[in-house]
Amino acid sequence: MTRVISEGFEMGDLVGIVTNGGAADSGRGRSGTYAGGMSTGESFTFTLSNLDEFYVRVPFYVYGTSTNRRFRLYWMKDSTVLGCILVDFPTSPFVNIQVGSTTVAIGTTRLFDVNGTYYSLEVHIKISDTGDIETKIDGNVEVSYSGDTKPGADTYANKIYILNNSSHDLGSSSFMFIDDIAVNDTAGGVDDSWCGDGHIILLKPNGDTATLDLTPSAAVGHYTLVDDIPTDGDTTYVEGSVVDEEDIYDLQACGLGEVIINRIWTEARAKDTASTGQNIALITKASGGAEVSGGDVPLLSSYSKKILGAEELVNPVDSNPWEVADIDALQGGVRTRS
């Protein structure tokens, strides 16, 4: 698997993202309900694993009364900027490619002429003395640069930094929203090139199954205690202290039509109430198949960690691509681990 990051903000929070302000904003999503929202000067940082070549998808739009609407996508080694994609409206409302702080290429497609329109930016970045920076807008090839993409001695990036650099001129305000973020590396033969168009949605638990081992915080359906978006923390929950206890839930129908489903995964917010270094594993169960468990995930003493299950690219029952009917019959849940 070579999908490094998939983020649709559908958990209604910014857990797992380094932020300087910003919020998960309901009602502005390109897909589903939520998007990542930033006002002027706010930023999100996504951590990478020392990549010298990778592909990024960042659908974004800038909205507001400000006449200066600016988007910045940086790739960095620690605090060193290796390169940047920037768009400045109205000064240069095009895709500008920078190596370090030097502009090396400018596109021809005008952006931001329509206030509050999502554009899906894709970037291929190869950091080398003979590197490449290629871009697409809404799937269409835009501008590229080939040459030295190393402004210094650093040979890889370990973070993606997205900044709303719009200005508050004459008391006005400007907001930027991003959604359906994806990063691919080039290893493994799968997800090793352009991310392409992609939409991330959330299916919440909407019913209990016969497997309900965990202890509910109230005498109601277990699924009603774990379906809050964003999480309500310690208000409603299920918990367990015995290894390999499970709760499995039915999931709501996806409501999709003729689509290609590339991957599914489970995601949760959980904590260790006793601070004893306990683990959980998230589970999926396709109709007619066995449970598929992700790896054991160590818990923290707060809801500040993104808990992920196994990413599945095909239906494990028949090894065929996921279909809408498969998703609508899917179940998911959690298992306590030591």
Image (cartoon, rainbow, N blue to C red):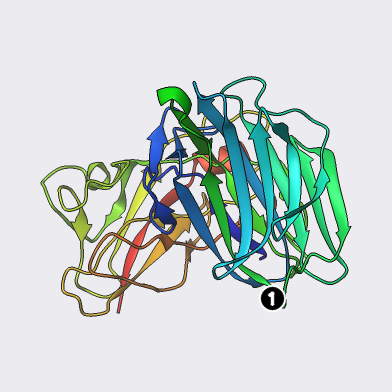
- Label 1: which secondary element: loop
Give the crowd class for mark 1: few <14, some 14-19, many >=20 residues within 10 Å: some
* Residue 91, image x, y percentages: 69, 31
Whether residue 230 is visible? yes
* Residue 317, image x, y percentages: 60, 56
Question: Does residue 170 appear left or right of residue 179 in this picture?
Answer: left
Question: Which residue sits at x=36%, y=47%?
Answer: 13
Q: Nearer the viewer, residue 176 or 278?
A: 176
Which part of the image, by quadrant, shows the C terminus?
Answer: bottom left
* Residue 254, image x, y percentages: 51, 34
Q: Nearer the viewer, residue 248 or 28?
A: 28
Quadrant for residue 187, please give it. Answer: bottom right
The correct choice, above or below, for 301 with respect to 203 in the image is below
Question: Does residue 266 appear left or right of residue 208 in this picture?
Answer: right
Q: Which residue is mark 1?
A: 154
Question: Does residue 218 appear left or right of residue 288 in this picture?
Answer: left
Whether residue 260 is visible? no
Question: Which residue sits at x=60%, y=40%?
Answer: 71
Which part of the image, by quadrant, shows the N terminus?
Answer: bottom right
Question: Which residue sits at x=51%, y=36%?
Answer: 177
Extreme residue in the front direction: 170
* Residue 245, image x, y percentages: 27, 67
Quadrant for residue 281, please give it. Answer: bottom left
The correct choice, above or below, for 22 with respect to 315 in the image is above
Question: Does residue 230 appear left or right of residue 274 in this picture?
Answer: right
In the rendered picture of this protein, how many numbered marks are placed on residues? 1
Residue type at tag 1: Asp
The correct choice, above or below, for 246 with respect to 288 in the image is below
